[in-house]
Image: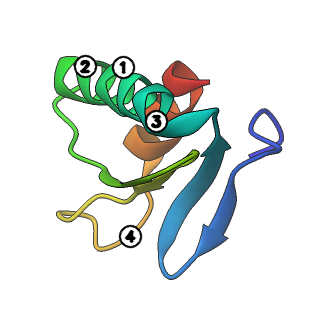
């Protein structure tokens, strides 16, 4: 968690909000995160809107945050 200062625990998930310039930039960020997630066989929740993308990582099989979530968060960063 020390290596991920912009991430926070909330609602049984590891979360991060990315602020960007506009909707197109939000889509680019979301697609990049999606590519990294697919490569890691992980499926985060992504909330996309104008100027922001929120990522929520948690492992369904673990019932919460696991090492896989921290590893993906580090790849995303």
Residue positioned 29% across, 74% down in the render: 63
Label 1 vs 3, first from the N-terminus? 3
Instruction: Report which residue position mark 1 lands on.
Output: 32
Using the rendered view, name the quadrant where residue 41 is placed: top left
Structural crowding at the residue carrying mark 4, measured as other residues with C-alpha within 10 Å and reported as few (<14), some (14–19) or many (≥20): some
Disc 3 element: helix
Between circles 4 and 3, the one closer to the viewer is: 3
Kindly identify which numbered label has been placed on residue 26: 3
Q: CA distance from mark 4 to mark 2?
A: 22 Å
Q: Badges 1 and 2: C-beta atoms under 8 Å apart?
A: yes
Residue positioned 69% across, 51% down in the render: 7
Kindly identify which numbered label has been placed on residue 35: 2
Question: Residue 25: horizontal and vertical position, in percent?
Answer: 49, 26
Instruction: Report which residue position mark 4 lands on.
Output: 64
Between circles 1 and 3, the one closer to the viewer is: 3
Question: Residue 76: horizontal and vertical position, in percent?
Answer: 51, 25
Question: Residue 36: horizontal and vertical position, in percent?
Answer: 32, 20
Is 67 displayed left or right of 51 in the figure?
Answer: left
Structural crowding at the residue carrying mark 1, measured as other residues with C-alpha within 10 Å and reported as few (<14), some (14–19) or many (≥20): few
Residue closest to the eye, 60 or 76? 76
Q: CA distance from mark 1 to mark 4?
A: 23 Å
Between circles 3 and 2, the one closer to the viewer is: 3
Disc 4 element: loop
Question: Residue 20: horizontal and vertical position, in percent?
Answer: 63, 35
Q: CA distance from mark 1 to mark 3?
A: 10 Å
Disc 2 element: helix
Residue 41 higher or lower than 66, as above or below = above
Label 3 vs 2, first from the N-terminus? 3
Q: Badges 1 and 3: C-beta atoms under 8 Å apart?
A: no
Is 65 displayed left or right of 39 in the figure?
Answer: right
Label 1 vs 4, first from the N-terminus? 1
Residue positioned 36% across, 32% down in the render: 27
């Amino acid at each position: 968690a020390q290596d991920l200062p912009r991430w926070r625990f909330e609602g049984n998930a590891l979360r991060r909000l990315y602020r960007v310039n506009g909707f197109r930039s939000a889509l680019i960020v979301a697609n990049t995160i999606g590519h990294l997630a697919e490569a890691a066989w992980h499926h985060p929740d992504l909330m996309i809107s104008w100027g922001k993308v929120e990522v929520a990582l948690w492992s369904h099989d673990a019932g919460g945050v696991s090492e896989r979530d921290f590893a993906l968060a580090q790849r995303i960063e």
